[in-house]
Image (tube, rainbow, N blue to C red):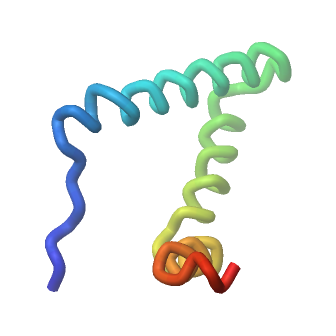
Amino acid sequence: MPEKWKPTQSQQSGPISRTFDLFNNELNELQRELNCPDEFIYDFLEVIKSIWTPDSCHSKARQKKREDPSAF
């Protein structure tokens, strides 16, 4: 069984941290704009999460594209 991927400290403090901040800021802005409860944001993130589940067709397509970019 392959080892689970883990980011390096540099990746964690660089692009991962920046992306977390970006997402958080965007979600806060969305909530202010819509005046929606936290529950809506939570459910919204669940939809996004489902697209990134390893068994989703979206995930399988991304994997195939990484394996053979010329096919797309």
User: Looking at the picture, does residue 25 appear above or below residue 45?
Assistant: above
Q: Position of residue 5 (x, y in %)?
A: 23, 61
> Which residue lies at the image location 81% right of the left edge and 18% below the top edge?
35
Quarter of the image with the C terminus in it:
bottom right
Q: Position of residue 32 (x, y in %)?
A: 76, 14
User: Looking at the picture, does residue 57 appear above or below residue 31?
Assistant: below
- In this picture, residue 63 sits left or right of residue 15: right
Q: Quadrant of residue 10?
A: top left
Quarter of the image with the N terminus in it:
bottom left
> Which residue lies at the image location 17% right of the left edge and 35% below the top edge?
9
Residue 26 seen in this snapshot: yes
> Which residue lies at the image location 17% right of the left edge and 79% below the top edge?
2
Q: Between 39 and 47, which is closer to the camera in this rendering?
A: 47
Q: Between 47 and 58, which is closer to the camera in this rendering?
A: 58
Q: Between 41 and 1, which is closer to the camera in this rendering?
A: 1
Q: Between 68 and 9, which is closer to the camera in this rendering?
A: 68
> Which residue lies at the image location 84% right of the left edge and 22% below the top edge?
34
- In this picture, residue 34 sits left or right of residue 68: right
Residue 56 seen in this snapshot: no
Q: Position of residue 41 (x, y in %)?
A: 66, 35
Q: Position of residue 64 (x, y in %)?
A: 54, 82
